[in-house]
Image (cartoon, helix red, strand yellow):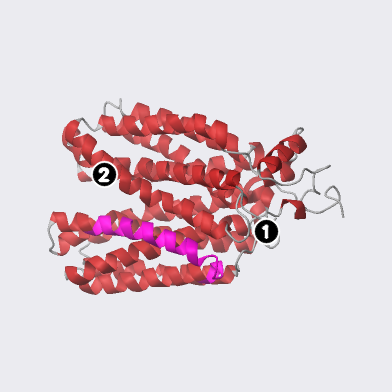
Amino acid sequence: MSHASAAPAPLVLERMSRFQWTAIAICVLLNMLDGFDVMVMAFTAPHVSTEWALSGKVLGLMLSAGLVGMALGSFLLAPLADRWGRRPMIMCCLVILTVGMALSALAANAWQLAALRVFTGIGIGGMLAGVGVITAEYANAKWRSTAVALQATGYPIGATAGGVLAAWMLEHFSWHSVFLIGAGASLLCIPLVLKCLPESLDFLVAKRPPDALPRLNALLARMQMPALQALPPAPVREGRRQGYAALFVGDLRRVSVLIALAFFLHMFAFYFVLSWTPKLLVSAGVSAQQGITGGVLLNLGGIVGGSLFGWLATRWALSRLTAVSLVLAMLGMLVFAGFNTTLGIAFPVAFVIGAALFASMAGLYAAAPVVFAADVRTTGLGWAIGVGRVGAILSPLTVGLLVDAGWQPSALYVLCALPLALAAWACLALRIGVGQTRR
């Protein structure tokens, strides 16, 4: 059978070239940038609050503003990536990030900064979906889950390195400088993406723009694969609906509900742990410095957990590995609830919780591109991330209300651990094996 007459088989990647690893490395770098941009408000919050004499309520709204923007970006921009291309959408989001971060440094009051955090978050949310899909599509079946796990690990690396840089900047300059650093980093990524980040192979096959074949062959040449005489047959999808309507046709309806449910429940627990752990540790009786140490251990655990997940993903079925990570995070949170003031136990458990939560996040990001067909892949990932961000927004607000109502830290950890069991069930129901993909 010739390449011209083959089904999508010619695009099944049997090996990993330097070009493919370079594309994945750029996606990791972009996720590191997202990690810094997401956390920049948390880094600067004490200084902003002091300068503008903000109440806790207003500061809380500012901290949530970026998450609102990320949800909007995932919902609104991800479907456009399936229409226009993953690479153009990533470029658009980088421009939004650069402008949003630069203008944030010039904000004159809390409401201007909050609005700019929403705007910046839109760019982050849109870019996360595109980056995740390109990472998955340029990795072969053996390395796909590992590549996506490495890309997801970029987030805690960016957050941790950004925290160290922000601490130094805030010692020598004003809080505005931290936003300018973020704007400069985003700006530097634009020429890098233009030069080195390729368009999605599956997008060219599924959407078939006029110059699809020469662009596809140029990419295949850089991957040291033979050229095609004609485009492979376009994927056939039931209903041919566009946008989010396409996610709820036939078998995709069940998949779309399960992946969104898993993202929502995971993000609810994830953002509770990251947002509230330092404060709840202090409320339970430890020092402020010890509370910060607990927060740092969560992110350090995330770096280890994401990397370990990537190694295990080449050996274990993705559904099972993600479900095990979710259950481990749940058990860790239950143990932490009982020993949060016994630091000899609490600190190692915090590391394990961070590792398990970031590992399961890597698993979910790896699962979403696998379960959606090429022509709705970014829309599907955007849908899952967007629903997950709703959980991220609701979690700090819900816990804040419960804290005001007198709930103790141990009870809050138990409450927020339980949704992870349902998330694990949703992952198992997706039934994704080792190296499984969907073209």
Mark 2 packing: few (<14 Cα in 10 Å), some, or many (20+)?
few
- Decide if residue 18 is in sight here: yes
Please, what is the three-letter code of the amino acid marked with disc 1? Answer: Arg
Q: Residue at x 30, y 64 (%)?
A: 351
Please, what is the three-letter code of the amino acid marked with disc 2? Answer: Val
Would you say residue 303 sits in the magenta stretch? yes
Looking at the image, residue 27 sits to the left or right of residue 35; the answer is right
SS category of the residue bearing label 1: loop
Which mark's residue is nearer the viewer, 1 or 2? 2
Residue 334 is situated, as x and y percent measured from the top left of the image, at: 30, 73
Q: Classify the position of the N terminus by image quarter.
A: bottom right
Residue 274 circle label: none
Residue 69 is situated, as x and y percent measured from the top left of the image, at: 43, 41
Residue 233 is situated, as x and y percent measured from the top left of the image, at: 81, 49
Q: Which residue carries the number 1 mark?
A: 438
Which comes sooner in the sequence, label 1 or label 2? Answer: 2
Mark 1 packing: few (<14 Cα in 10 Å), some, or many (20+)?
few
Looking at the image, residue 50 sits to the left or right of residue 97; the answer is left
* 102, 253: nearer the viewer: 102
Majority secondary structure of magenta residues: helix
* 327, 155: nearer the viewer: 155
Marks 1 & 2, CB-CB < 8 Å contact:
no
In magenta, the rendered stretch is 294-320
Q: Which residue carries the number 2 mark?
A: 164
